[in-house]
Image (cartoon, rainbow, N blue to C red):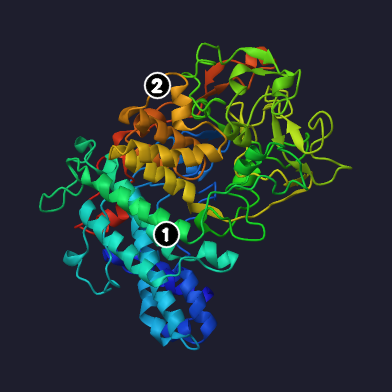
Amino acid sequence: MNRLYKLALLCGATLLLGSSCSNFLDIVPDERPTEKDAYSDRNKGIDYLYSCYAYLPNPAGTTGSLDLLTGDEVITSFEHESFSSFPKGKYTASSPGISYWNNFFQGIRQCYMFSKVIDKLPDTSDAEKADYKAQINFLLAYYHYLLLRCYGPIILVKELPDVNTRVEDYAARTNFDECVSWIAAKFDEAAAGLPATRNDVKSRVGLATSTAAKGFKAKLYLYAASPLFNGGQPSLFESLKDKNGNHLMPMTYDPQKWVRAKEAIKQAIDAAEAAGYALYMKDDQYKSQNKYPENGIERRLRLTILDWVGSPNPEVIFADSRGVGLYDFQGKSTPKGVDGSEYGYNGVGPTWAMLNRFYTKNGLPWDEDPETKNLDPLEVVAVDAAHAAHAKEGVKTIKFNLDREPRFYAWIGFQGGYFEILNKEPSNPLYPTPSFMPEAGRVLLDFTKNGNQGRKGRNNNYTPSGYLNKKGTFPNQLMAKNGVTVISHPWPLLRLGDLYLSYAEACVETNDLAEAKTYIDKIRTRAGIPTVDAAWSAIGVTPDQDKLRKIVRQERQIELYLENQNFWDMRRWLLAKDAFGHKAKGLDIEATSIEEFAKLKEIVFERAFSDANYLLPIPIDDINRNGNLINNPGY
């Protein structure tokens, strides 16, 4: 693998734009790998294949992930890290922050290099070689798909680039619709040669399958049909033209793109279900280790993307298998331990905007449910026996935190509520009893300034919003003063629930409202809330197309909360400017009493979003190197 990595560094994606590889030579030692080294034995061939996946970003790597903590779902106390340039709008072509442009093109080049030697691999059967070729086709499509999502029209790399290409012949960007067609065809080519699933856990989640290829082709068509890429605001991209004056982005709306998306997503769903994928429905997993949460639906929801015990997660179609590190998503979401402990970073705080997306127990938005819409959500109340499953009886909280849907309680830690987690060393606990844990297995949260989760003057390791994320954390995770038992798990990149809601969205846009509700209801039923018709008919509303569009979008925002979707969804819906362009709100974490804490205030962290931010900038070095390459508007 080491030699293969050197090969990738020697000739990276910048060659696609005509640059020399001399800038890499200073980091390559004297050893000179040859092409033959890459396939001198069977294991080296397998390593070469795996190296083609190595350019994919780590979606759960919080410090450098483009799309995890960068939407409007959460706000964190880690804004000194590189990801924060995106919610602040502080990235440019000359300083692009987290840029995937060159990395993905390096991955594409690596794939083409490997494809040249597959037939020469020793001790490798014809069936294995065919599988390797299909995986390479998948990766070529997938890298181009990821580039398209970031940058819109891209350079299509249809073969291994020639390093001797003349400057005037350097590749230019291809118009968006042609890019979509080529990528879709490449996914089809991959699917034809791939198995529907992989047999063992690591291979199944880490390597390409035909089910994943069909799923990502469906997502590609979903993006292409969405307002951002389907003429929804042509003035955004009026200036984005090639050297001949041709528009690179669609300027007019095409309703047939929704028809195409609907058909492709349904095909992907049918393929996934035929391959055995299903919504995660286990209500008692890990219960012998921690009985909390006691409610089976809440436990099911907490573990939907986490459970890989014994067999692959039944819902996850494609995942990143690198797992989660100590200082990544899991650690940053766990409650702070007793003073003096380093562990429990307590820094991922859901925003007031995100919290309002969660439904009431009746499956309705707070401000439309007759039981809640006339209440003051910030009114301080004492928790009564009827709500003691989610918050300690007698403790004060706000009305907004009571009578909410199961996903709220599975994924959100709130004032006076519980965070289900374990002490590793009961004799020397990270969370002492009873000040942190009234009983073993769950921390009672207090976010006021001097509370057990309060800021207490810290510059990090506190939640800026007065709430704490629980999604992506295990109720059976063991926490200690001197270390944490990190439960590593694959991170989902595509799951069946996403396809169900994508299909429902396409059904709404093609005015097939009954079918849309059928697939929204699959998610709502798993979440333990009434169906669309049951919830809305109870208040005398029959959702029309416009209403159902809002419902399916809200359902995506809830169900896929903190799964790398919000950053992209709000852009493709053309809602990001309104959603991301202002400071977030939360409760007053500087307050020492619950009465003062229960006041909504603007969080100080800078937020900005302009029209230029709908697409990402191509690095200026590449623009300067290639006279045929045009940057996105605003850069």
Amino acid type at mark 1:
Ala
Specify the amino acid type for callout 2. Val
Q: Mark 2 points at which residue?
A: 541
* Residue 155 visible (yes or no): yes
- Disc 1 on helix, strand or loop? helix
Residue at the extreme right: 427
Q: Which residue is more in the foreground, 265 or 582?
A: 265
The span from disc 1 to disc 2 (Cα, nearest Å) is 35 Å
Q: Which residue: 28% across, 63% down?
A: 185
Characterize the local packing of mark 2: few (<14), some (14-19) or many (20 or more) Cα atoms within 10 angstroms: few
Give the camera-side residue of 77 and 248: 248
Question: Circle 1 sits on which residue?
Answer: 271
Residue sitting at x 48%, y 42%: 522
- Tag 2 secondary structure: loop
Image coordinates of residue 571 in percent, x first then y, are 35, 39
Q: Position of residue 305 (x, y in %)?
A: 57, 49
Residue 635 seen by the camera:
no
Q: In this view, does 294 lie to the left or right of 557?
A: right
The answer to whether residue 266 is above or below residue 453 is below
Q: Look at the picture and state if 406 lies above or below 497.
A: above
Quadrant in the picture for the C terminus: top left
- Residue shown at 47%/18% (left/top)? 367
x and y percentages locating residue 236 in the rendered image: 23, 37
